[in-house]
Image (spheres, rainbow, N blue to C red):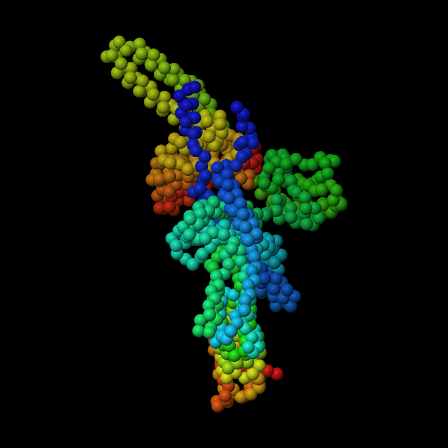
Amino acid sequence: MSEAAVTDMNARVEPESLGLGRRLERASHALAFIAVGVPLGALGALAFAGVIAGATLSVLWLGLPLLLAATAACSRLAEADRRAANRFLDTHIAALPPLARTTGGPWRRSLAMLSDRQLWRLVALQAVKPPLAAATLVAALAPVILTAGLLGLGAQGIIGSGSTEYVGPLTLGPAAGALLVALALPAAVVAIAVLDGLYSVLCTVTRGLLVPRTAPGGPVREMLAESLGDETLSIAYWLPDRGAFFDEAGHQVALPDRGSGRAWTAVERDGRRVAAIVHDAAVDMGPELVQAAAAAAALAIDNERLKADLRARVEELRVSRLRIVEAGDAARRRLERDLHDGAQQQLVSLALSLRLLRNRLREQPHILPLVDDLDQQLRAALSELRELARGIHPAMLTDQGLGPAIEALAGRAPLPVELDIAVGAERLAAPIEAAAYFVVAEALTNVAKYAGAQVAHVQLRRASGELTIVVADDGIGGADAEAGSGLRGLHDRVSALDGTLTIESPPGHGTRIHTHIPLAPASSG
Amino acid sequence: MPRLGPLASRSLSAWGRLVAASAFVLAGLGVVVGAWWATSSEDRVTSYVVSGSLNGVLLDLGDADADIMGGGEGRPVRVQYTDSFAFGHAPIVRRDVGGGVLSIRARCPKIVLGICSSRYRVTVPDNVPVTVRTNAGDVHFNDVRGSARIDTRDGDISVAGFCGFSLLAQSQTGDVQATAACAAERMVLRSRTGDVRALVPRGRYRIDASSDRGTRRLSGITSVDDAPFQIQALSSTGDVVVEAVP
């Protein structure tokens, strides 16, 4: 086994961690979110009651102002929920889309606002929020109160203060007090586990409730689907310079074949082919009806077509960027393999030969210092070459995957690194693994060079169809994302995978780099 | 040596094992304590009679409820109480007769995770003064013929068919209600936050009835300064009613 392999294996040896620091952080964040959620839930109940009262009284034309005020309150409370979730749960929910606005008199504007589906979704959210807040409050506080109670009673028993004489069958004295304090430990573990679990549940539920649901095909598709009574309807836009149909997201699509259960109707404008309406063949809509709807919507469809064209170009650009990154990674892997198999092996072989030579020259001590000097230089060259190879592309990443490679990376870091890796046994796609690895490597290098930190934390999570990477430190903060080329390069690499990379670095409060990479990008090209 | 397959990689993490062990310990303990509680719960009834001439009865009952019954002329004092408790932690009862006064003091120990309660039923002969003190316990007097003094902190007080020289009933937060079968020379009913209600035979009384924040109502009663019978009904925030028995 080569020396390099031995070094890498040693770097992987690390005790299984409880991840208590991270769990406590998540538990405290869950508690904070629940604490904020209780008053928001109470206000949400009031706002929902206002909506009901306003809707009931609107029959008499008196409730409309109340209805409008209550729905606006629901919208603002949902926005407050979103901010709280992003602040405490790290959910990264985008801003809620603005409510429908139109011109005209107050009556017309009110009706337009009240017919917005998004608004009623937010109103429904306020109906769900109070029981959810109450349930999470009870679930969160029960184990916390149990722990605090055990600790308090235990302290009373040990110190001999307080008026409690018995706890269940026990007479409260020093021995029972010690037992209760000891029992507070498992209670605390359960409390942390419950809060940690609630953090995940709240993340999922809040995302489900607040992430905006946009129609897959935009307003024109919605309009046509409604007028033709086919919710499965979609529009394929014709892009003449590509000679193919594309969907709204800019992905190429094929029109359905006859007998596939789907049918399509061409849309033309001024004699030009613009798009095709793809609908359910079983839906009873005559071709005249579809033609009429298509003719009426031709202008709007043509506008949407231009947007689809733009998106197709963006998608093309994204795919080409991804190909460049993949080609770069492949070149890096080849270079690393060549270095490992070629120059590195030759240097190792040379080092062995030098040792043999040293053994033979024992009778000529005046030459030995020269040989030792050569040996030192050779070791330094080998070490530098190994570092170079790792920087180009770590062999461990290719051979063993992301988890072991990150563990090895942390093992070589010049400061303590707390690892929390949950990416599962299944390998990720090579570009994703490479991006994740280089994000962590660059971030740890920056921490060691500039942050003045005592410890760094690295968290990798594979959940909800994405890989989340968080690298945090307790250093001086104040990092500028635009200052260095390393982070900019990483940002480009992550963007090529449809991912996001954000840096929080308030001065004096450390730096956190959040990276989200979807595991199934929209298109791999 | 057996090989660890995919099952091993799907097994609980160190944290998962710690949580499972902790939950197991707590749940196991909960089951044991629950079973112990169920098997050790009991209701114990005790009764006795105190014969001879008594000058008074003093009951200091903590959180226990009390039913005081009039026993008639020359009858002995009968005491019956029911203690409910678990884990063997019964209320502590101290009984004493000194200076012709029967004193009973009962207190539940301070318990977390357990039960302890008592209910007293005491029959007293006519013309024997009775004093009852409780914290959270309710006090009910029924057909007692003799002076009485009742103090509670949170318990309600209800007196029915009272006929004695004086009745002093006061509570901090409980309601106070007294119905007199005959005009008592002095009837004082007070509560800080509860309602106060006095029902007395028709007649002329010196009445001091007032409430700082509640309502005050006199009905069927004539209030005169030189009347031989005095009624004081006071509350800070509750309603005050003094009326004649129909």
Residue B33: image x %, image y %? 53, 50
Residue A215: image x %, image y %? 61, 47
**Going by the image, does A148 lie left or right of A295?**
left
Could you tell me if residue B31 is visible in this image? yes
Front-most of residues A381 and A145? A145
Q: Which residue lies furthest to the left in this view?
A: A366
Q: Residue furthest front?
A: B52
Front-most of residues B226 and A58? B226
Tell me: residue B144, above or below residue A484: below
Front-most of residues B128 and B61? B128
Tell me: residue B77, above or below residue A322: below
For the point 42% across and 52% down, the residue is A173
Count of marks, rendered view: 0
For the point 63% across and 38% down, the residue is A238
Residue A423: image x %, image y %? 51, 35
For the point 45% across and 51% down, the residue is A150
Tell me: residue A344, above or below residue A464: above
**Going by the image, does A198 lie left or right of A418?**
right
Quadrant of the image containing the N terminus of chain A: top left
Task: Give the quarter of the image for residue A263.
Answer: top right
Could you tell me if residue A467 is visible in this image? no
Quadrant of the image containing the C terminus of chain A: top right
For the point 56% across and 75% down, the residue is B75
Tell me: residue B215, above or below residue A210: below
Residue A459: image x %, image y %? 46, 38
Front-most of residues A163 and B223? A163
